Image: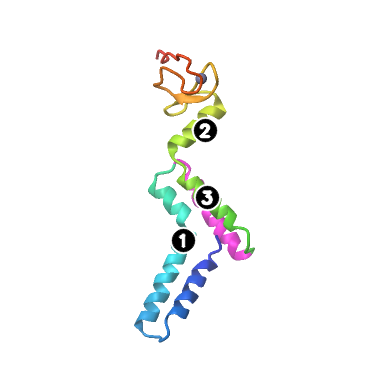
Amino acid sequence: MDPSIAVSFAMLGALLARDHSLWFYFALLALTALGLALCLLPGIIATRRHHPQRLAIWALTLVSGLLGGVLGGWTWLAWLVALVWACLSRDTLDRWAARAAGTPVGTWRICPACAEAIRVSATKCRYCQTDVATPVP
Ligand SMILES: [Zn+2]
């Protein structure tokens, strides 16, 4: 997202405050901080959730912010991608990885009958109802 959104929030603060009292400067500071936090939201969420790809999400967040400052316009899409990516759970990512690789990842494995992703501990496939014995270690 364009970091100038922080400036937009600051301008909103300037519009809201009619007199330039201490409250004006407080609102200016608070809204600028809010705008900046919004710009960095995907990275912040990824870090707080200990996302396995948080470094890549931070990179996308910062690059979309920097490019937004230079190019403007459509970089909010990259910001949105980073936000969705940050919100995906490790479990969901593991399920996708298991399906892509065809091998067990995390708590997921592939059903030998229908090739859908099922839990490692499952004894019956939820998709094709095939009895799937837990693999012997
Ligand atoms: Zn199945």
The residue beneath circle 3 is 82
Q: Position of residue 39 (x, y in %)?
A: 49, 60
Q: Earlier in the sequence, mark 3 or mark 2?
A: 3
The residue beneath circle 2 is 96
At a point 59% along the width and 65% down the height, the residue shown is: 69
At a point 40% along the width and 44% down the height, the residue shown is: 50
* Kind of element beneath mark 2: helix
Contact, mark 1 vs mark 3 (Cβ under 8 Å)? no
Q: Earlier in the sequence, mark 1 or mark 3?
A: 1
Residue placed most toward the observer, 83 or 36: 83
Which part of the image, by quadrant, shows the N terminus? Answer: bottom right
Residue placed most toward the observer, 125 or 42: 125
Q: Position of residue 6 (x, y in %)?
A: 49, 68
Residue placed most toward the observer, 77 or 67: 77
Look at the image and give the residue range highlighted in magenta.
Answer: 52-70
* Numbered badge on residue 38: 1
User: Secondary structure of the magenta portion, mostly?
Assistant: helix
The three-letter amino acid code for the residue at tag 2 is: Trp
Which part of the image, by quadrant, shows the C terminus? Answer: top left
Q: Is residue 132 above or below residue 90?
A: above
Disc 2: CA contacts within 10 A as few (<14), some (14-19) or many (>=20): some
Q: Is residue 39 above or below residue 18?
A: above
The reply to whether the magenta stretch includes residue 99 is no
Q: Is residue 123 above or below residue 100?
A: above
* Kind of element beneath mark 1: helix
* Kind of element beneath mark 3: helix
At a point 52% along the width and 50% down the height, the residue shown is: 82
Query: In the picture provided, is 101 more to the left or to the right than 137?
Result: right
